[in-house]
Image (tube, grey):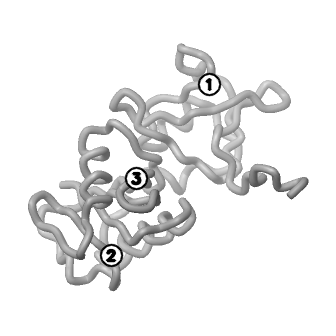
Amino acid sequence: MILGIDSGSRTVTEAEHLLHTVVEVLGLPSDVVGCTHFVSTGTPHVACSLTVPAQVDLTLLPEGVSASLGESRTGSDPDGAALAAAAHESRASGRIVVFPGRGELVGTLSVGELLERSAVARVRVLAQSEPADADLPVATNDFVRPVWEDGVMTLLTMPASGGMLMPAEVPNPTPCCGDHA
């Protein structure tokens, strides 16, 4: 079952914090899948989705969090939560933050090792249509955020120095205009 949660997070960092908090307060196991989703209900913001067991106590959610679990809804404006849950359910979109094997993806691993150790099912190099070769090394920077692509958990990568790959999303990107604002 998919739980959509929304607290109006303005950044992916805020949404990731909410996601980790909800996993903790609900006491969920490490094999859950949790995503962030950009939504445009009201003011555009970031909502979350999370796989949960059929029985989950929504009263444990932090104050100010709207939730959507099937037909059960809490909060005054659950639209962002419902949109996030629907996107996750269909695997149409979502930036995957929590997933099985996430903690094993540290340092430099081959594409094959990355696929073997985690729920990531495909590694793709940006601007290339074929999946990455299993022997290529991936410098994870200890920050791996796959996405749903064609219903498959896919890590988007880009070429890095030394013939390596690295995740396309980096942990601390330079803000647009950050060097001349």
Residue sitting farthest toward the right: 180
Q: Tell me where residue 10 appears, x and y as whole percent.
A: 52, 65
| Residue 65, disc | 2
Of marks 2 and 1, the one in the foreground = 2
Instruction: Name the residue beneath numbered marker 1.
Output: 125
Confirm or deny contact between disc 3 and disc 1 (CB under 8 A): no
Q: Quadrant of residue 119?
A: top left
Residue 21 falls in which quadrant of the image?
bottom left
Provide the residue designation for mark 3. 40
So how many labels did they put on this image?
A: 3
Q: Position of residue 164 (x, y in %)?
A: 75, 29
Q: Are marks 3 and 2 in contact (CB under 8 Å)?
A: no
Looking at the image, residue 179 lies above or below residue 7: above
- Disc on the earlier residue, 2 or 1: 2
Question: Please, what secondary structure does the residue beneath circle 1 have?
Answer: strand
Determine the CA span between mark 3 and mark 1.
29 Å
Quarter of the image containing the C terminus?
bottom right
* Mark 3 / mark 2, whichever is N-terminal: 3
Mark 1 Cα shell of 10 Å, populated few (<14), some (14-19), many (≥20):
some
**Rendering coords of residue 125 (x, y %):** 62, 25
| Amino acid type, callout 2 | Val
Question: Mark 3 or mark 1, which is nearer to you?
Answer: 3
171 up-or-down from 125: above or below: below
At a point 39% along the width and 72% down the height, the residue shown is 7
For residue 137, side relative to residue 101 (left or right) = right
Between circles 3 and 2, the one closer to the viewer is: 3
Tell me the element at label 2: loop
Please name the amino acid that badge 1 sits on: Val
Q: Earlier in the sequence, mark 3 or mark 1?
A: 3
